[in-house]
Image (cartoon, grey):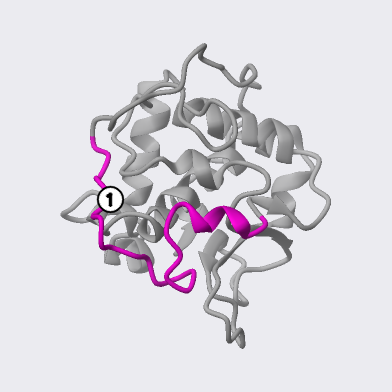
Amino acid sequence: MLFSMRWVELAVVATIGGLACGPTIRAGLCPGEVPTASAWRGTGAQGRDSATLKVVPAYVLQSSCPNWKPALEIAKRISGCWANGLRGSCPKCPIPCNNCQFLEDGFFPEAYIVEHINGSLDAISAVGVPKGATDGVKVASFRNWLCYQPQYTEILAKAMVHESIHLCKEVVPATPAMNDNWARWLLGISIGTSDTADLVDECWKNNGL
């Protein structure tokens, strides 16, 4: 699904501090987190479950992006990440799965820096199976202009969290929060059920950003 500039306020933002690491690994589900059904398997990554997803290279950056590391630290802090794809504390918003597993280098999916998203200059990020691919494995794509100006670091971090929430569908049953609302595509706003963009906005608001 696409993360669009329609709902991003282009403002100069302050650089946020580094990754907050807790002394222990979070056990149990956080508020809003969807339990994994024992027989359930995602389909976008060839039916891999959360354990076998780790063999796929990823948010493994495939291109140069100077803002990548500081943006990833912000995304991890917002998501309560610890290390090795594990969650050290519950995020201050109801992210529906442990999205830390998608924000860790070496974990699914591969991430590419691109000039456009499927020909669109409006969308700034997306995750999905590339056109023409036959293996069914999803990749993440982020617009190249996010990489080079410090004031875009937080926008890149939001895009990372946004796409990682879409990827929750790979490891737990889907909920409305894992999808972009239909009105987001047409009008740039959410109507009715809160969607992924609303959830990301809540995450930033609850962290005082």
Q: Which region of the structure is painted magenta?
A: 32-57
Q: Amino acid at mark 1?
A: Thr
Position of residue 7 measured from the top left corner of the image (x, y, whole percent):
43, 49
Position of residue 165 measured from the top left corner of the image (x, y, whole percent):
41, 49
View extreme (top): residue: 23
Question: Quadrant location of residue 140?
Answer: bottom right
Q: Is residue 56 left or right of residue 49?
A: right
Position of residue 51 measured from the top left corner of the image (x, y, whole percent):
47, 52
Q: Nearer the viewer, residue 110 or 57?
A: 57
Determine the residue positioned at 34% across, 63% down. 187
> Considering only vertical position in the picture, is 60 above or below 9?
below
Q: Is residue 152 left or right of residue 162?
A: right
Q: Nearer the viewer, residue 124 or 163?
A: 163
Determine the residue positioned at 55% across, 31% down. 76
Q: What is the number of callouts on the image?
A: 1
Determine the residue positioned at 57% across, 81% down. 135
Determine the residue positioned at 23% across, 49% down. 194
The residue wearing badge 1 is: 36
Helix, strand or loop status at disc 1: loop
